[in-house]
Image (tube, coloured by chain):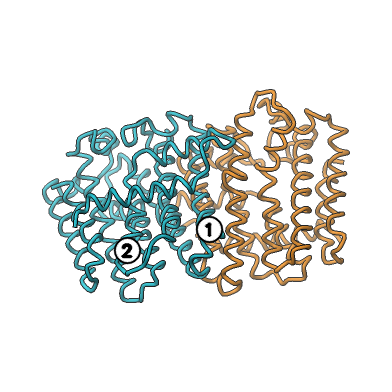
Chain colours: A orange, B cyan
Amino acid sequence: MDIKSYLSRKKDIVDKALDKLVPPATMFPTSVHEAMRYSLFAGGKRVRPILAIAAAEALGAKTTDLLPLSGALELIHTYSLIHDDLPAMDDDDLRRGRPTCHKVYGEAIAVLAGDGLLTMAFEVLSDPRRAKAIPANRLIAIIKEISTASGVFGMVGGQVVDMEAEGKDIDFPTLEYIHTHKTGALIRASVRIGAIYAKAGKRRFTALTHYGELVGLAFQIADDILDITGKQEEIGKDVGSDLKKGKKTFPSFYGLEESRRRAVEVADKAILSLKDFDRKADPLRELAKYIVNRVN
Amino acid sequence: MDIKSYLSRKKDIVDKALDKLVPPATMFPTSVHEAMRYSLFAGGKRVRPILAIAAAEALGAKTTDLLPLSGALELIHTYSLIHDDLPAMDDDDLRRGRPTCHKVYGEAIAVLAGDGLLTMAFEVLSDPRRAKAIPANRLIAIIKEISTASGVFGMVGGQVVDMEAEGKDIDFPTLEYIHTHKTGALIRASVRIGAIYAKAGKRRFTALTHYGELVGLAFQIADDILDITGKQEEIGKDVGSDLKKGKKTFPSFYGLEESRRRAVEVADKAILSLKDFDRKADPLRELAKYIVNRVN
């Protein structure tokens, strides 16, 4: 299968779904709706929604009704980028090659656009239209999965530690904490909500959870490597920005070569965790390969 | 009935429930958990959870299982105060007589503590323990109610307009928009989640919705009046802070006396909307009176 064309096809479908989920930019008060859309449609690759969809497909489920649920993941991911970029946080001027949300709309609207996107994720998940497509108890399980991965036990906790680690000589377990919480938790949750949606049995749910954890780690190692070796056009932000901020990364502990080797190893393990799945899981397998191919 | 002792009794019960809902301040990473607790236990009156409880009681329901659900309202209310106080927003140094969250923990942790509290509201609402006490479809309806009232169609939208109105010569409909969205929406939702929890029929649900809208308005008019006439010890912030920020309020359109008259009129209407309820709705009636008695 051609993973690039798979990703681009799915991205189009997710983008269309997202466009329906958020209010038009012309809705009063326009500033916040413009800002939400500015960041939501800034060229994101939609990795999280696509992982949810690919996980559900691996289990043989139709994914039409999963689309809005998977969109909630992207709303939350986008909110986290807006808040992380704030001057009080990572103070970034560029994101995906464009000025960050607060640079365009000001800090106050950026805070509120983030708050609005985070809250909208739960508006979307609890919309009566969802309840028609999926039993309420499974919907509750999906809300629990996404909220836990996003809050202090997940993404928010990871961002706190990441921020407090800046310029400090942290140890490897602390870097691991940051990786598994800041980005890992929501990636794991993405795969798992696809599995909950598709009524995965216990064994397959566990397998997909492992896949989600490993692919999240591979993703993060690759991201750390690209921050050093990538071209600005590719990564959409300044090359070496982690280093400049005094942020420890995977390569600062293991060097570039060993980091590359580990990324491949982790991706291979992710693929291995899907050994009991048939060819319907090929997109998940190819995704794991694709992530590490970007850095090799 | 003695509304003051009712409020203080319920506040104790809500405080104990809240203490169980949020992680201990000693949990890693401690900064964000300390900050969340600092703002959550800063002496809030717990108006929103108490309104939810009183609405359920008015319908004859036992409220033990409503406590954590009503706690989610307070988590969201607290997050909104933390973000509103940020330098980029209202830039307030004092809240309830104490330094604001960002003054104590810094801006970054304040943003993240707000994000953490907002997300935790949905973690609490989707916790498997909830699902044991209330059918999943009603829980979904409660999540929809709370998220819609908090997001861009409610609180976030109201805060955007409030902020953009600062120093501007806004008209009365704009002030009404701010009132009904920034504070009104979540107060209305508080009463309504009590009603959903207690399985209100259509007629009573509508009556309680009206009550919630009117009591929210009375609350806001009273708040505007207290900003002018209150003592700093009572209101926990600088007297005249709206005026200083160039914020239009109810009294700036109608003067103090007429504002007081309207507050009483609105509270009377709120009480009238409960005419088909028996004495179990007395706490709701007394609450409406209590709100306007503070300014007369």
Residue B249 relative to residue B111: left or right? left
Give the mark count. 2
Report the chain holding disc 2.
B
Relative image position of residue B14 (x, y in whole percent): 38, 50
Three-letter residue code for mark 1: Phe
Residue at 22% x, 67% y is B279
Residue A286 badge: none
Q: Is residue B248 above or below residue A136?
A: above
- Comparing labels 2 and 1, the label whose residue is closer to the camera: 2
Work out whether residue B27 or residue B44 is closer to the camera in this orientation and state it: B27
Residue picked out by circle 2: B55
Report the chain holding disc 1.
A
Three-letter residue code for mark 2: Ala
Work out whether residue B52 or residue A34 is closer to the camera in this orientation and state it: B52
Relative image position of residue A161 (x, y in whole percent): 62, 34
Relative image position of residue B147 (x, y in whole percent): 46, 58
**Marks 2 and 1, Cα distance to the nearest angstrom?**
24 Å
Figure quadrant of residue A171: top right
Residue at 30% x, 50% y is B9
Work out whether residue A32 or residue B150 is closer to the camera in this orientation and state it: B150
Residue B3 relative to residue A214: left or right? left
Q: Secondary structure at mark 1?
A: helix
Relative image position of residue B189 (x, y in whole percent): 38, 60
Judge if badges 2 and 1 mark residues of a common chain: no
Residue B28 relative to residue A108: left or right? right
Residue picked out by circle 1: A122
Q: Residues within 10 Å of mark 2 (few under 14, many from 20)?
A: many
The residue lying furthest to the left in this view is: B257
Q: Secondary structure at mark 2?
A: helix
Q: Residues within 10 Å of mark 1 (few under 14, many from 20)?
A: many
Residue at 57% x, 37% y is B27
